[in-house]
Image (cartoon, rainbow, N blue to C red):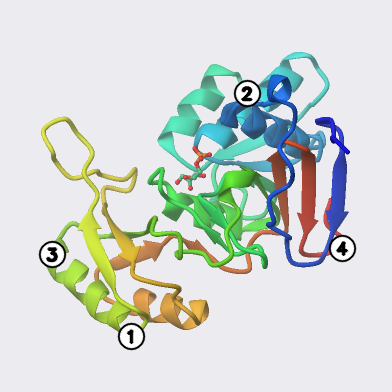
Amino acid sequence: MALAYDPLFITSDKSPIDIASPPPPPSSMILTQDELKRIAAYKAVDFVKSGMVLGLGTGSTARHAVDRIGELLRQGKLENIVGIPTSEKTEEQALSLGIPLSDLDAHPVVDLSIDGADEVDPYLNLVKGRGGSLLREKMIEGASKEFVVIVDESKMVRHIGGSRMALPVEIVPFCWRFTAGKLREVMEGYGGCEAKLRLGGEKGEAFVTDNGNYIVDMYLEKDMGDLRSVSDEILRLPGVVEHGMFLDMASTVIIAGELGVRIKNKHSSCC
Ligand SMILES: O=C(CO)[C@H](O)[C@H](O)COP(=O)(O)O
């Protein structure tokens, strides 16, 4: 039986995510990846209430959520929102939409953060930071009572870091080759990795984060195994500022796919 695409079709359960591929929808109904991102983002903004302090994520998916918050404010459907942007780019977008902004110094407790992710595993562990904003994202989302992650279904994986895509690590520029070497040494114990400095500009110069740091992208040889222990070892290295594994931080993941939207909750109290 052919299943029609229904963007309002929502499932919600607490079991690990079933990432088996659903049957494809009729070709006339195939949505672009960007449309799926927008559907997930709009669904997340349904959880925003007037008076909230909001963590505003970074990236092409989070951008839709910030646009939607701006639209609802303009229409008077949301009031007294304070946004805390996770990057300078999001700050610029939010300001252009008239969203009032603040920071963690003034608002150390955030009601709800909404952000995208590069990978999500069945236990809602994430890889983030391929857009380069992982440090501020981790600070703000870690200070949030609820952290809602918005993705299209291409981001769902069995093991984070196992897709031969990069696991980003933010490091200080001082002697970055030394720190990249230490990261390679640590990762020897977890299957090995290629560690490459992320480049940003046209002239091949290093990508510089909003915090003035560099990013080393670790291309892992295989599944890392014990994520907590990898995380602890990486964070113990002098020169490392933060890494892009967000372990046990997401409270909800909203996944937009060709057959509709699925919502995975970590805590039953959420949303
Ligand atoms: O972590 C991030 C930026 O640091 C982004 O949330 C992540 O890279 C996903 O981006 P996109 O929504 O563009 O796919």
Q: Amino acid at mark 4?
A: Ser
Left or right, residue 212 beside residue 14: left
Task: Look at the numbered disc 1 and give the secondary structure of its residue.
Answer: loop
- Whichever of labels 4 and 3 marks the residue nearer the N terminus, that label is 3
Structural distance between the alpha carbons of marks 2 and 4:
28 Å
Give me the residue at 61% from left, 54% from top: 156
Q: Nearer the viewer, residue 142 or 221?
A: 221
The residue under the point 50% across, 76% down is 227
Q: Which residue is located at x 70 percent, y 39 percent?
A: 257
For marks 4 and 1, give the CA distance: 36 Å
Q: CA distance from mark 3 to mark 2?
A: 39 Å
Q: Which residue is mark 2?
A: 67
Q: Residue 137 vs residue 16: left or right?
A: left
As shown in the figure, which amino acid type bears the numbered disc 2? Asp
Q: Count the marks: how many?
A: 4
Residue at 16% in and 30% down: 202
- The amino acid on which the numbered mark 3 sits, given as a three-letter code, is Arg
Note whether ligand 1 is within 8 Å of mark 4: no
Check the image and report above or below for 269 versus 72. Answer: below
